[in-house]
Image: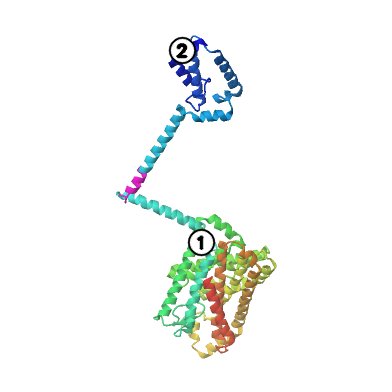
Amino acid sequence: NGASFMRSPQEQDEESGEGSYDSYDSDESSYTSDSYYESRSESNGSSSSSSSSNHWERVANARRDNRDANTGRHDYRDIESGPRDERQMLLNQGNSNYASVSSHQQTKTRKKNKDQKHRRKHRQEKLRGPPLRLDDAFGMMWKKMHSIFVMLELLISNMPSLIGSLALAWASLGIDWFKWYEENASDCVPTDYHNEACVFPEFPGCFACDTSRAGYRISLNFHYLCSAISFALASCLIGKLLIAFPVVRDELANPTTAAPLGLLCMALDKCFAGNFGFFGTAILFMSSALQTTVAIWFIFISVVYKTLPEPSWFPNTTGIGLAAVKMFLYWAMGGYILSGVSLVAFFMFYFVALYRLHTNEKISAVVCWLQLSGPAVVLYGYSIFSQPGSDEEELSLLNPENKAQFFQVHRKYYMPLNHLLFAFCMISMASALYCLKTRWASFKSKEFSPAHVGFCAPLASHANAIQAYRASLNKYSLSPPNTFFKEFLYRYWCLSLICGTIL
């Protein structure tokens, strides 16, 4: 004990600064294991060089060694006997040791360097202007074009396949409103399709109009605009077919989800038929051949595998009637054949699909609404039989006897089937409204889905079919033009056209 009082003040300060346990007034608030053992070794070395050592310090060292060996913990706070709260308070009152101080300084240094880099980068962005080198300019333009291309690719890949329904709806609206103007304009006179006076050959019917009038030019430009929008939407589906072919292939492999293919073919037929010369003709023949092949495949699986049809089959089967109308522009016999295939598919699938709609409530409202396109496209395609098939037949109608026989045959054979198809169109409208009413509770509770685009095309096709029926009725009917039925039919056609446009 006397030896400790004989030490110099410098040795006592060094011992107290090296982690002695006899006082809690040390300037160090926390120690790591390495710093503690360094201080312990220095303390042992200084004590061995002294003349004697304290008895209580040897006891404390023994306790500490035993505790470290047993617990494996190397923190000097474990051997403290004071309360935990008092130890924490005393430790918090002290200053940071060298390790904590250096860590804090390193953190401040990193933060300062980071702030300097940020300010330097921000200053460079402010000073950055147009590239001075030509290769830098091309590189920057290429990066921007690449980012735009990636965004466009993602947009097309995530486009719903039923976008073809919207494309078909736009093409149908352009035709319907153009024909609405031709029927209501005073300077437009109905004529035959192969007549030279037919200024714009577009079914249903054809008119000889004054093309210099502003109303005609506006309606024709609107028809072109709708065709351009339809082609843009159809191009998105074609792009998806090229970019994400496995996904589209899986959709088209199932007859239930293969409707987008038929919708795409019908939209392309309306966009390219009669336009773009040889290129438009090639697109029309390829899409018609593809849709015909798919229609034959659907007929095959329904007969061989006894697969029950549903309204989602109509775009790929009865929808071939629209291809028949456009094929009639170039090859009359090909149009007749396709119209016959469309009629056969309609009578095979329509009644079974109608029965399933009213017996299976699990079928969605969108699929129920697709039943409008079944008889509508068939009636529209059947209207080509009301026209002379060639220029020779058109010239033969100049003979009064030939013209009388032509009208007599059409009133006897053509008009009865035309009336029957119109009746099926009205039955489908009533059935679609009833199915929508019964499924309205579950339909309105669901969020908007891309599948809801399927509501657009059927109503536009229905309006197109009513227009085709009116054209045949006005041409071959012997009743006066102002009868109740014809007035009702005109108002119903305008109503369905307006509703289809809004939808």
Colour setting: rainbow
**Please, which residue is most extreme toward the top here?**
51
Residue 331 versus residue 339: which sits nearer the camera?
339
Give residue 400's position: percent from left, percent from top.
51, 90
Q: Residue 198's image quarter? A: bottom left
Give residue 335's position: percent from left, percent from top.
54, 74
Who's the residue at 61% across and 74% down the image? 429
Residue 104 versus residue 438: which sits nearer the camera?
104
For the C terminus, the quadrant is bottom right
- The secondary structure making up most of the magenta span is helix
Residue at the disc numbered 1: 237
Who's the residue at 66% across and 72% down the image? 351
* Magenta-span inclusion, residue 125: yes
Residue at the disc numbered 2: 7
Which three-letter amino acid code belongs to the residue tagged 2?
A: Arg
Tell me if 357 is positioned left or right of 332 in this view.
right
Which three-letter amino acid code belongs to the residue tagged 1?
A: Leu
**Please, which residue is most extreme toward the left here?**
132
Instruction: Tell me: residue 396, above or below residue 427.
Output: below
Instruction: Tell me: residue 253, above or below residue 118.
Output: below
Using a 10 Å C-alpha cutoff, classify the residue at mark 1 as few (fewer than 14 neighbours), some (14 to 19) or many (20 or more).
many
> At numbered mark 1, what does the secondary structure look like: helix, strand or loop?
helix
> At numbered mark 2, what does the secondary structure look like: helix, strand or loop?
loop
Give residue 210's position: percent from left, percent from top.
41, 82
Residue 244 versus residue 76: which sits nearer the camera?
76
Q: What is the magenta range? A: 120-131
